Image: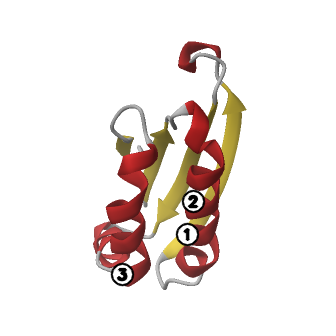
Amino acid sequence: MITVFASFYPNEKDVESVRKILQGMVEPTRNEEGNVTYDLYSMDDVENEGTETFHLFEIYTGKEALDFHRETAHYKDYRANIVKYLKKPIQVKVLNKIK
């Protein structure tokens, strides 16, 4: 199993655009073979000047499933479009479960 934790810090004026893009990723990703969990969270973030931040918690059956996810059209589209709405780069942590 591989777990991914990704954090998104939108510009204050772009919170809804980021929310919409990320919400659009949920259903198609959950339908991918090899995806176990794909949950989107939000948080009022004091460290982000009070602007809402978003966090994805993802679990895949293995590296192959994660690699497949990163090659899908919906993933490539979201990555190409979301960056312009963020005040800093996406923070992604890929974690390997300790057995």
- Give percent across and percent down for residue 75: 39, 71
- Give percent across and percent down for residue 98: 41, 43
Q: Is residue 79 above or below residue 30?
A: above
* Horizontal relation, residue 84 to residue 19: left or right: left
Q: Of the numbered discs in the image, which one, if any, rests on residue 35? A: none
* Horizontal relation, residue 11 to residue 93: left or right: right
| Kind of residue at disc 1 | Met
The image shows a total of numbered marks equal to 3
| Kind of residue at disc 2 | Leu
| Distance from the alpha carbon under mark 3 to that under mark 1 | 11 Å
Residue at coordinates 57% horizontally, 43% vertically from top-left?
14
Q: Which residue is mark 1?
A: 25
Kindly check if marks 1 and 2 are in contact, taking CB atoms under 8 A apart as contact.
yes
Residue at coordinates 37% horizontally, 82% vertically from top-left?
73
Q: Is residue 63 visible?
A: yes
| Distance from the alpha carbon under mark 1 to that under mark 2 | 5 Å
Dot 3 or dot 1, earlier in sequence: 1
Binning the other alpha carbons within 10 Å of mark 3 as few (below 14), some (14 to 19) or many (20 upward) gives few
Residue at coordinates 55% horizontally, 69% vertically from top-left?
25
Q: Nearer the viewer, mark 2 or mark 3?
A: 2
Report which quarter residue 88 is drawn in. Answer: top left
| Distance from the alpha carbon under mark 2 to that under mark 3 | 15 Å
Label 3 SS: loop
Q: Which residue is mark 2?
A: 22
Report which quarter residue 49 is drawn in. Answer: top right
Label 2 SS: helix
Q: Which residue is mark 3?
A: 72
Display colour scheme: secondary structure
| Kind of residue at disc 3 | Thr
From the viewer's side, name the closer residue of 49 and 97. 49
